[in-house]
Structure formats: C-alpha cells, structure tokens
Image (cartoon, rainbow, N blue to C red):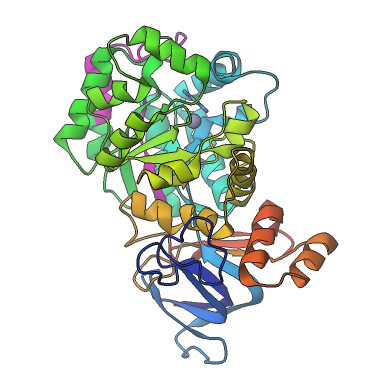
Amino acid sequence: MIAIRADLLDFTAAPRWGDTGDGGHSGHGGEPAVRWRPDHWLLVDAQGRIAGVQPGAVEPGPAYARDDQRGRLLLPGFIDTHVHSPQIEVIASFGTELLDWLQRYTFPAERAWADPAVAAAGSARFLDALLAHGTTAAVVFPTVHKGSAEALFQAAQQRGMRLVAGKVLMDRHAPDGLRDDDLAQAERDCVDLIERWHGRGRNAYAVTVRFAPTSTPAQLAMAGALCRADASLYLQTHVAENRVEVQWVQRLFPAARSYLDVYAQAGLLHPRSVLAHGIWLDEADLGTLRDSGAQIAFCPSSNLFLGSGLMDWPQRQAAGVAVSVGSDVGGGTSLSLPRTLADGYKVQALAGHRLTAWTALHAATRGAADALKLAHEIGSLDAGCLADVCLWDWSRDAVGERRLAVAQDLHEKLFAWMTLADAGHLAATYVAGRRLYTRADR
Ligand code: GUN
Ligand code: ZN
C-alpha cells in the first residue's frame, strides 16, 4: 500500500464549454466539475486501487509506504484514444497530406511488423514511451498482422496497462504484405484474438477497420457482424479526416449518403465506437453519431501536421457527441497529451472557439473514460478506481516558473501548465499503484 502526497486535480463531471471558473461547473445542475485538492495524500490499497484522499497534514497510517511528492501536480493517467503503435518510426515525416503520407511513409513502416520479433520489440518500446509521457491507457492501432496485436496485448499485460486494440482490417488499396488474404482468414484472426485477449487482464478488443477505402464492403460487413455478435467489443476506425479522402470514399461507395454513412450501413456505429478525426461531417452525420453513442477522437496535432482541417469541438458537444483526444502518432508529432491539448487549443482558436483547460483535461481523463464505459476503472481519482496516475512538475524553467507565479486563479495556472508542459515535466507514472516510469534525473 502506498500514499502519494501532491496537488491532486481531477474531474467529477464534464465542465461547461467556456467555463474558466475555479469549479469549472458542469452543464448538469451547475455542480463543480473540477476537483482541486492541493497538498493531499492519495491512498492506494494493496490491489492498486484508490482507497481515498486526505489532507497533507493528516499522516497516512503505518501500513502505507509514503511517496512524498509535495509541490508536484498529480493527475489521473492520460487516456490517448487514438494512436498507432508502429508509427513511432514515421513521426515527423516531411511533406505530405494523408493519402501520400500513408503510401510513402506509413505503409512501408507497418510492413516490417509482419515479423513477430519486430512487433514484440516495437510494442514494448511503444508502451514504455506512452508511460514516459504520462499516458496510462490507450486505444491503439497496431498493423494488419495478427502477431502485431498479439504482441501489443502481451506487452500491455506485462505492464498491467489498460489497453483497447485489435488487429487492423485491410483487404484492398494497400500494398503487398499489408492486406488480409481473404475474408475468412481475417475473421478467424479476429475471433481468435477476441477469445485470447478480450477481457483478459486489462485488455479489451476493438474491431479495427483502418478506414473505408482499405476495406471491401464484404470486410466491412464482417466487421459489423463481429460487433453485433458481442456488444462488449469496441470498434475503432478513421473517418472524414481529409477532403481528398472524403471524395475518394464518395467514389468508392456511391450509394452511401456520406463517409460516416458507410460505417452506419455496415453496423459499425455503437456506444463503444471510437472514430478518429471526424472533421468533415455534416449535421446529419452528427445526429447519426449522437444517436449511436459513438465518440470522436480529436487529434489536433495530426490535423495540423497533415494539414487535414479544423474539427469544430463545441459544435460536436452541442450535438451531444462525446469528444476525446488522440495523439494520432505518427500523424501527430508527440505522444504527450499536454502537447496535444495545447495544439487542440490552437485548432479551436483557428475555428473561432476557446478550449478551456477544464474541457481539455477532462476530455483526456474522465471524459474519455466515460465515453469508453471505463469510468469505474480509470480517468479519475475516485475511490475504487485503479491508481493509474501521472505526477508532474508545475514548471521546469524560468519562463514556466514565472508564468505560474503570476497566475491569478486556478484555471489560469492549469491552462499555462497545459500549454507549456512537455514530457520533461513528467516526474513519474504509476499503473495500478506501481511506479512504472521515473524521470532519469530524479
Ligand atoms: N487514415 C487511415 N490510416 C490512417 C493512419 O494511419 N493515420 C491517420 N492519421 N489517418 C489514417
Ligand atoms: Zn490514426
């Protein structure tokens, strides 16, 4: 049993859009949504669950090993709802938009993961990198190869991390070595992986359609049948990221009303669906999304880097569509969710909106957990949740130190922290109460 002393911040509900008050009041009844407990102990039981919180002046009992991190910020571990494990190797690749980027950089890198040794080493490297950025849970695309999902689940199990993933489905418009051989083999691979990994440890399976252009209608139908057969499965895919991509989908699926409608027709939209990007959607699409309960993973770093477009967050929120946050590495340029949220602020600013630190940090923690139906386990410092937490320095240099020193209220302080923090601010990451990452200089 351990007790960690720090400044604790988490959320009890979704803050209202635009609210920068200390409480970041929720839309429901105006209750405070932000839970700020400066200088408190977080108590963790022997099973790695949060047992409670108490003021710093109240010493924990002798059964607790004390980890005194006074003066640091402790948050729930970040939840990255869209990221690609093999794409660390193509992060920061020059000069292309989505479709050329896939052909020139991404597909060649993913081909190497056919080798189980490459997939095993790469999965370990990837998950350790998430932890080194304060991310303790993720919704992940590996590659089309069954062994890439196997390796990822195994590496997550070894670390005790919460992971949602599945083998990528692709049976057309992809190079040799990156396509499913046939429908039956792809389905067998999925069924096999579901039996082995769905609900084992902290792993869950996501039926993983890369995007509409790389699956035949038959493969999309197979994916829909898997979802219908087991409502506890997740679904992940990309939608409406890039305008040329959207036009291509229109040509490939002339009978569909829209890109999103291709997925709706195939039975891929449900409360456990995570759709990356969702930039180029119309009002009817937003209604479809709301009715299905599917969420959008907003990936601002990727959207800026690949020049994809500006997703309108408040429009989605007003339509009743849940929005979480994805790094989308390697389209995105950092695994850090604070970096991603800082980009999110800028994307919203370009679209004429103001993203508060409350809405941003909530979406990357409790909001994502809620949308994934995992709020009983992750996303907050509620008693009973697993102690997946990340511990941060408030500042690392003279600029950050001065900026935080002059901040007038809690939102100003957290907004400045979120905008300036990078992986170097992270002091430690804990998964189920075990410290799995410690910054080297500590
Ligand atoms: N659309 C289909 N595949 C991908 C991918 O790997 N990254 C991004 N950003 N978009 C995609
Ligand atoms: Zn992606």
Residue 316's place in the image compared with 309, above or below, is below
Q: Residue furthest right?
A: 398
Residue 184 shown in magenta = yes
The x and y percentages for residue 24 are 50, 66
* Residue 332 image offset from top left, x and y in percent: 60, 35
Is residue 438 a member of the stretch shown in magenta? Answer: no
**258 or 263: nearer the eye?**
258
Please indicate whether residue 433 sits to the left or right of residue 439 in the image. left
**How many discs mark residues in the rendered view?**
0
Whole-percent x and y of residue 158?
43, 50
Residue at the far left in the pictured view:
229
The residue at the point 31 percent across, 44 percent down is: 204
Q: Position of residue 427 (x, y in %)?
A: 65, 63
Quadrant (top left/top right/bottom left/bottom right) for the N terminus:
bottom left
Q: Is 202 placed left or right of 433 in the picture?
A: left
Residue 439 visible, this angle: no
Q: Is residue 108 left or right of residue 96?
A: left
**Residue at 34% in and 71% down:** 384
The residue nearer to you, when weighing 43 against 321, is 321
425 shown above or below 103: below
On screen, 375 above or below 125? below
Q: Quadrant of the C terminus?
A: bottom right
Q: Magenta region: which residues?
A: 161-190
